Amino acid sequence: MPSDDAFDVGPVPIRIPVNEKLTRRLVAAQFPQWSDLPIEPVANGGWDNWTFHLGTDMLVRLPSASEYAQAVEKEHRWLPVLGPQLPLPIPVPLAKGEPDNEYPHAWSIYRWLDGVAATADRIADPVRFALDLADFLAALQSIDAAEGPQPGVHNWFRGGTLRTYDQDTQRALDELAGHVDVELAGEIWADALAAPWDGVDRWFHGDVAEGNLLLRAGQLAAVIDFGTCGVGDPACDLAVAWTLLPDDARRAFRDRLSVDAAAWARGRGWALWKALATCSHVSEDPEDAVEFERAKRVLGEIFSEYSSSNSAAPTVTASPSA
């Protein structure tokens, strides 16, 4: 059984700026066959990478900090292995760029995968979506995990113990007293920390969120951004059950994946940590009111599902000793 000691995620990454001019120069210098293609920023291109359209069917991703750059080698090594074994398209790198005197990290060119982010209002049939996503994650978990990347800074220790984020969670609970039900949140967090893992490494994505799930015609069509992928405890991928899925789709998702009580509790813990961290970070800033309300909505889903599942659980009466 693996150690349950917390990891040190280190300081907040220091991001470096990247613009179209620099991207165009890097592409022209290292991949002259694509130098004439137009380059434009991708709308909502993410935080870990600066992302640009290259022509109409390619994508340039340049890590925004040294910590995020650790994912580049991993993606080039493993995405071509994972892709053919999965039921939906994922990004597969076309070329790897090298650092130079103006930009310090390796970077990537990918084929563009078309689709829109899987926001709740765009999903045509939430239960169908949940089943398709569960099938994708089941296929990912079934891939041979030998030699796969263990939890580390490259993925902020996704796949490792939730205790890595215990101090952050406790701090958020202190800060959010009076804003959310911190007593119930603390109970749910303790339940997640106590839930055991069997120690069997399995592949996980690490950031199964609406921006990384692409829809076409309202149905799940592709899964992108594997920067936090790795092997370990895949419970981190269950957080989407509370962040995106309504109750009936959540149940269908759990049933399809055959998630046991311990893994479900750990997944709930991952969702709780992120929601509490978001609420704590944005609660005092009026400009972030929408994000605060969105995180509170997720907390409401977590609280409701946890309370409902506990009230539905059968009471176990101890047998009298002989």
Image: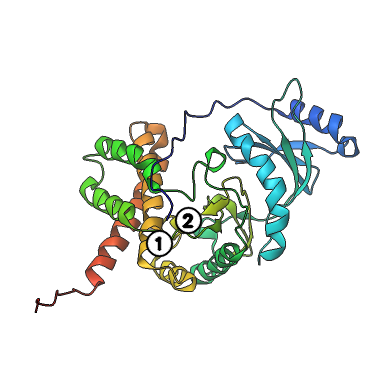
Do callouts 2 and 1 mark residues in contact (Cβ within 8 Å)? yes
Image coordinates of residue 260 in percent, x first then y, are 39, 68
Camera-side residue of 163 and 137: 163
As displayed, is residue 10 above or below residue 71? above
Q: Residue furthest top?
A: 101
Graded by Cα atoms within 10 Å as few (under 14), some (14 to 19) or many (20 or more), the crowding at tag 2 reads many
- Who's the residue at 9% across and 76% down the image? 321
Q: Residue furthest right?
A: 33
| Residue 113 visible (yes or no) | no
Going by the image, does 237 lie left or right of 116?
Answer: left
Q: Helix, strand, or loop for circle 2?
A: loop
Image coordinates of residue 3 in percent, x first then y, are 41, 48
Amino acid on which disc 2 is placed: Asp
Q: Helix, strand, or loop for circle 1?
A: helix
Image coordinates of residue 304 in percent, x first then y, are 29, 60
As displayed, is residue 119 above or below residue 38? below
- Who's the residue at 41% across and 51% down the image? 270
As displayed, is residue 33 above or below residue 312? above
Which image quadrant: the N terminus? Answer: bottom left
Q: How is the image coloured?
A: rainbow
Image coordinates of residue 26 in percent, x first then y, are 79, 29
Residue hosting label 1? 263
Q: Quadrant of residue 258?
A: bottom left
- Who's the residue at 73% across and 54% down the image? 80
Residue hosting label 2? 233
As displayed, is residue 70 above or below residue 300? above
Amino acid on which disc 1 is placed: Ala
